[in-house]
Amino acid sequence: MKKIKSFWILGAVGILLIVLVPVISFWPRPTAVSGDPWANVPQHPVHTSHADIVQGPFETPQDVTRACLECHPEAASDVMMTTHWTWESQPFEVSWRDEPVTIGKINQINNFCISAQGNQHQCMTCHIGYAWSDETPYDFTEQANVDCLVCHADMGIYAKGTYGNPAEGVDLLAAAQSVRAPTRENCGSCHFNGGGGNNVKHGDLAESLYFPDQEVDVHMGGNDFLCTDCHVTQNHEILGRLVVDNVTIDPSEQVACATCHTGTVHTDERLTAHVQSVACQTCHIPTIALDEPTKTYWDWSTAGLDRPEEHFTYLRIKGTFIYEQNLMPTYLWFNGNLDYRYLLGDLIDFDGPTFINVPSGNIHDPTALIFPFKVHVANQPYDTQYGYLLAPITSGPNGYWTNFDWDNAFRLSEPITGLAYSGHYDFTETWMFWPSTHMVQPADRALQCDDCHGENGRLDWIALGYPGDPIEWGGRFQRP
């Protein structure tokens, strides 16, 4: 019996070897994970309390800035070189204009609030300077108007008010004594409320990121990252630029996952192969507006009507909205730049929607990756005779929000925008693309194979330039 049992065991082992060896041979081999991402995260400086250093009293916010410059003499001049101050890019050439152009909030329009020039009263709440005015051009050379507090004060003590000035009642001395390195509350006070409210514009920047858990954002929640851990800052120049206000961006000025996650970051070769064509964000940010809704549609043509108001559906001063939550992104090839950005005075597209921006990249571009975007669609005013989008004056005693007169709002804007108004207007559909890079999910919540591949996959392979699902035609993820 013992001999029979031994032979049976040996036979069974032999059969298993015959079956398993081929399987093991073709099973994806784990690859070593290289690089320590923590080695690339900047060390936080040791904070020096200013509670006993800063002395008052301060009559004006400019007095606070002058006090800051006594110890930090280069700070204001550094800030004034950044787009946080200028709200405008450096001049560069584009194919559809004869002369170099600049792009930024200061001189261009979008399809949310349309133009900062039409509402300096409120829009400049998020500018890093004091003392804006509707009557006179802003003095970008005045160092005392640099607002040090908005980035460095405790936001439980300090807040911005109208025209970029501190909110009424702010204790300037207490705010100045509270200064420290910027926190998420400082950055988020503006960036989380772009477009007029919480998470309205971006879809991946919301007030929930002030104190998130890791299910909202694995970096800020799970590891308590500050914004400046990724957006590294030197001499007040902050790494990372938003492509909607630029056409071309030097990669050295941008933030990338691979800045910290170097080398081979996956143990599965199948995932590693995807990195050649798929952005990290595509798999690791599976939904937009994860926990708070974001605006996806804005119809200005319905503004001014006498109908019931509700924050997420209709406001008389702004029109009709659609907000969405847990939104599946739109996926496009993207190389970090734009093929086109609508400039003030460009003609609209009369045969379809006018694109405010067009992400650059395609399947044949070796620098492009499949990337997630939020798409915002709007119905906004344009001049029917001249054929370009109009930027109304919305705020102020004679603005649209006072008298609900579009014709008057467009006439008021002529000397400010420099665009002639024919006296005839209508509304047209526009699209704007916003890349999603925040609210990164834990690894176990990343997209799985079936989310993209198969009959109900979320990617439109034909639109992306593939002949079909790469799994079906055997091309894996290599570009054809």
Image: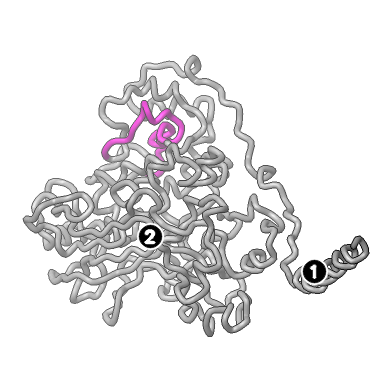
171 vs 10, nearest the viewer = 10
Q: For this rendering, which residue is in front, 412 or 256?
A: 256
Residue at 85% over, 67% down: 8
Tell me the amino acid under the disc marked 2: Leu
Q: Residue at x 17, y 57 (%)?
A: 412
Residue 16, labelled with which disc? 1
- Of marks 2 and 1, the one in the foreground: 1
Residue 327's tag is: 2
Q: Which residues are drawn in magenta?
A: 140-162
Q: Residue 317 shows which numbered tag?
A: none
Residue 187 in the image: above or below residue 256: above
Mark found first going from the N terminus, 2 or 1 = 1
Residue 475 drawn at (x, y percent): 62, 80
Q: Nearer the viewer, residue 292 or 416?
A: 292
Q: Residue at x 62, y 65 (%)?
A: 275
Dot 2, how many residues are within 10 Å of its Cα: few (below 14), some (14-19), or many (20+)? some
Q: Amino acid at mark 1?
A: Leu
Residue at disc 1, secondary structure? helix
